[in-house]
Image (tube, grey):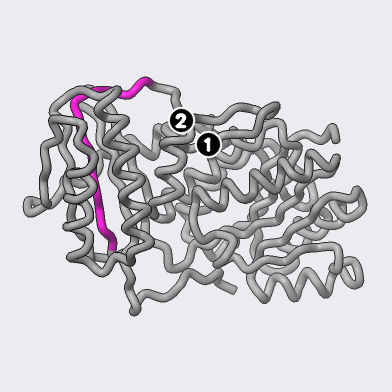
């Protein structure tokens, strides 16, 4: 397989523009023996099946809410599928319409970051990704997409996107805004020795005062242990752990680890999955694992020190699951 990796934006206004871009993309994959996936809502799936006819049997359709459930896990699963296809001499081809409705600003920012990081993570895989963006989306979401996709599809043609940003420049742009200050009543623990037993006991005691499920608590303990260990090995004291809950918008348990050291630039901060031997290398597994374990990970580093803020969603029965607008 000698195909080059592509990541294209498909802006569309109505069914005709959607099909004008999506159909040739899918049909080309079917003609060349690619593994072809289409991640779209029911309405778009019906349009595609009708237009493809009997050929639709060669397309794997997936529900957006399941596919786009978690930024790091989606990236890992898709990258693994691309590597598997490449080992078989095939190309992974994905038409993936991201889920934007019912997402908080923080969730939207993390998915936009994934759109940027894809351009680094998938280098050398030969995968072909096309991301439809409806004209009905907020203008800011479409504008950000022009920064994270090297090409835009219009009228069946792929054109270089003049607004495209280097992925790491885009991530730096995302991290330019300081994190909100922790609440004044946040639980605070100064860490001055490598006593992980008491650290885990402290986190457990606080978490069990919240509705956090036991499985998520175990994930949080692994993530906090990794981040604190990293701070003790590479950061500078004082190292401070803070915990609090947020209920405005997305209910979450928040755990923050801060120290006065500064991280080296250009490390990726665990945004890219480790890769199998013989493929383009990713970053160390520790921070990547933390991103897999938590709902959201925010990192800020500078002259005033470094902060890693972990968020794990708390059960909220009144919050609807994200759905893709039709």
209 vs 31: above or below: below
Give how far across and how far down residue 261 sits, in percent. 23, 23
300 vs 326: above or below: above
Asked if marks 1 and 2 touch (Cβ < 8 Å), the reply is yes
269 vs 14: above or below: above
Neighbour tally class for label 1: few under 14, some 14-19, many 20 plus, Cα within 10 Å: many
Q: Quadrant of the C terminus?
A: bottom right
Q: Which mark is residue 268?
A: 2
Q: Residue at x 42, y 32 (%)?
A: 269
Give how far across and how far down residue 201 sits, in percent. 19, 50
Secondary structure of the residue carrying numbered label 1: loop
Q: Quadrant of the N terminus?
A: top right
> What secondary structure is the magenta-colored segment mainly?
strand
Q: Is residue 102 left or right of residue 159?
A: left
Label 1, label 2: how far apart the Cα atoms are = 7 Å
Give how far across and how far down residue 172 sits, in percent. 40, 32
Is residue 304 among what the camera can see? Answer: no
Question: Image quarter for residue 313?
Answer: bottom left
Is residue 9 among what the camera can see? Answer: yes
Q: Is residue 143 left or right of residue 119?
A: left
- What segment is highlighted magenta in the picture? 252-264
10 vs 135: above or below: above
Which one is in front, 10 or 256?
Answer: 256
Residue farthest toward the bottom in the current orientation of the protein: 318
Q: Which mark is residue 272?
A: 1
Which one is in front, 73 or 178?
Answer: 73
């Amino acid at each position: 397989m000698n195909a080059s990796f592509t990541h294209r934006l498909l802006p569309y206004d109505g069914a005709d523009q959607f099909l004008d871009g999506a159909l040739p993309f899918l049909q080309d994959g079917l003609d060349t023996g690619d593994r072809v996936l289409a991640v779209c809502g029911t309405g778009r799936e019906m349009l595609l099946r009708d237009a493809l006819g009997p050929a639709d049997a060669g397309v794997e359709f997936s529900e957006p809410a399941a596919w786009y459930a978690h930024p790091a896990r989606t990236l890992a699963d898709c990258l693994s599928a691309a590597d598997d296809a490449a080992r078989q001499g095939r190309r992974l081809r994905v038409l993936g319409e991201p889920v934007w409705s019912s997402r908080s600003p923080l969730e939207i920012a993390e998915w936009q970051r994934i759109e940027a990081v894809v351009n680094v993570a998938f280098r050398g895989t030969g995968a072909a990704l096309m991301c439809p963006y409806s004209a009905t989306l907020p203008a800011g979401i479409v504008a950000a997409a022009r920064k994270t996709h090297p090409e835009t599809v219009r009228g069946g043609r792929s054109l270089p996107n003049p607004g495209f940003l280097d992925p790491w420049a885009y991530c730096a742009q995302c991290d330019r805004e300081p994190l909100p200050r922790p609440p004044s009543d946040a639980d605070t623990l100064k860490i001055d020795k490598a006593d992980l037993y008491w650290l885990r006991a402290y986190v457990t005691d606080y978490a069990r005062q919240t509705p956090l499920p036991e499985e998520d608590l175990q994930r949080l303990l692994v993530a906090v242990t990794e981040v604190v260990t990293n701070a003790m090995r590479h950061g500078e004291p004082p190292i401070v752990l803070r915990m609090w809950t947020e209920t405005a918008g997305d209910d979450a348990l928040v755990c923050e680890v801060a120290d006065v050291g500064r991280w080296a630039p250009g490390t990726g901060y665990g945004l890219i999955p480790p890769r199998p031997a013989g493929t383009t290398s990713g970053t160390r597994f520790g921070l990547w694992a933390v991103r897999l374990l938590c709902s959201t990970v925010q990192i800020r580093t500078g002259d005033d020190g470094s902060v890693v803020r972990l968020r794990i969603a708390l059960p909220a029965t009144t919050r609807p699951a994200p759905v893709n607008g039709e």
